[in-house]
Image: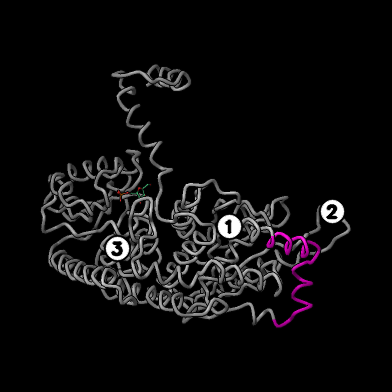
Amino acid sequence: MTAADFDELRIHAVRLSDASLSRLVEDDPARASDFALRVGPLYASFARQRYDRQALEALFALADNADLAGAMRRLADGAVVNPTEGRAALHTALRSDLSAAPGAKASSALAREARGAMATLIDTLAASDVTDIVSVGIGGSDLGPRLVVDALSPVAGGRFRVHFLSNVDGSAAQRVLAGLDPSRTAAILISKTFGTQETLLNGGIVRDWLGGGERIYAVSANIERAEAFGVARERILPMWDWVGGRYSLWSAVGYPIALAIGMAGFEALLAGAADMDAHALSAVPKHNLAVWHALTAVWNRNALGAATQAVLPYDERLKLLPNYLQQLVMESLGKSVRLDGAELRVQTVPVWWGGAGTDTQHSFFQALHQGTQVVPADFIGVVRNDHPHVQNHRALLANLLAQTEALANGQANDDPHRAYAGNRPSTLLLLDALTPQSLGMLIALYEHSVYLQSVLWGINAFDQFGVELGKQVASRLLPALHGEAEADDPVTQALLAEIRQRA
Ligand code: F6P
């Protein structure tokens, strides 16, 4: 997209600046159905976004100009979509076989083989007296499995209880291990590089606590390092450089998921994602949910200037979705140079944040309704409940519908303190039920939307050099903490002196 394309979006935003959302709906009642799409168990309504049909035309013209359809095909075919690291991003090959490209076919075959190995390891564990699993990893090696396990674990009666350990803070290890019995616990160390400080330190704590490496499994693209850590070769599952960490839960990184919900559940999760892949690859832009979602994100950011984006799952089981999406979206799109290194002249990713259910209404919704910043939101609801508390579920859904309506329509009042301006945009994503399949589909939707946003902005969604500097400085400062070196920076020097004195 060129600067002129973004200017055109802004012209539409100016044209619509006096049009309230309630007026847009009143003037065009068909938008409730025309601005909605269904893909299998997932229904999405964009009717409460602050665009009209004319602005949407401009957005879809951008989708065509940017060749979003071609970009999706290149992704699935294993083109080098991550040129700064010279890599493909073949997460689609982990769950679907929708490409005739030999590289993508070979990747799908490797992924199937790894799932076979995973199933065998699960059978071995199931035949042992292990009841609890500690999954050690961070970022993409933690957030995806953590989200899915939390969302889909049976309320009672799962074969294994899975616990997650990520933060380098020793209190995290202390808390996770307290209450577990080392003789009935196994651990999985998940790290693509097997060089991540947090995972190696926490892995060391768990190995000591278990009394050795016998019940330690690993998932890594660096088999040698995993072996050097003390994990036996037959207990190491592979990962590959053609899968980005934050796109990897569909690979053996999802081993904790398969342990928590069973291999069949894991396959169903993959099948749901594969359905979304097929949709994103084949539906024309105007009927393509991933394209709608991506264009809406660009509209809110670049035409309306929204600096943040909320994600509000109205389902307790999806409470980790905001954390997961923070990495997926912000690590992918938090860039300020184009693919060719040229400086961007438009804003990229807003800050993503959020929380679950009606709890959030009693904390930050005041600002969403009456604050000076307009915060676009993705609301996520689940139609059918899996618990017996019907009244609660109705109340939950009533609150979900009420909030999207109140944010959009507002309410006039002579007293300015009691007036609601409304006009606050949201998308509503409704799952028929929360199942492995529908969750797989929802996550894959976000993955594709993120990629398509990166194409529209002309940035690389698959590198993350921004996280490296802090890691380098931390490793330089480590010896300084126990007095074996000095910091160069005067402020850090003063802070170190303070810490040493108080330690
Ligand atoms: O936070 C930076 C990062 O490189 C993420 O992209 C990645 O998911 C995480 O660290 C963990 O990396 P690894 O799987 O190599 O331990």
Mark 2 or 1, nearer chain start: 1
Q: Quadrant of residue 437?
A: bottom left
Q: Is residue 143 left or right of residue 260?
A: right
Spatial CA span between label 2 and label 3: 51 Å
The amino acid on which the numbered mark 2 sits, given as a three-letter code, is Pro
Stretch of the chain drawn in magenta: 8-30
Disc 3 and disc 1 in contact, CB within 8 angstroms: no
Which class describes the residues within 10 Å of circle 2: few (<14), some (14-19), or many (20+)?
few
The amino acid on which the numbered mark 3 sits, given as a three-letter code, is Gly
Q: Quadrant of residue 199?
A: top left
Q: Is residue 182 left or right of residue 374?
A: left
Asked whether mark 3 and ligand 1 are closer than 8 Å, the reply comes as no
Label 1: which secondary element: strand
Q: Position of residue 297 (x, y in %)?
A: 58, 62
Q: Residue at x 17, y 49 (%)?
A: 226
Which class describes the residues within 10 Å of circle 3: few (<14), some (14-19), or many (20+)?
many
Q: Quadrant of the N terminus?
A: bottom right
Q: Position of residue 174 (x, y in %)?
A: 30, 42
Residue topped by disc 1:
310
The amino acid on which the numbered mark 1 sits, given as a three-letter code, is Ala
Q: Position of residue 457 (x, y in %)?
A: 54, 57
Label 3: which secondary element: helix
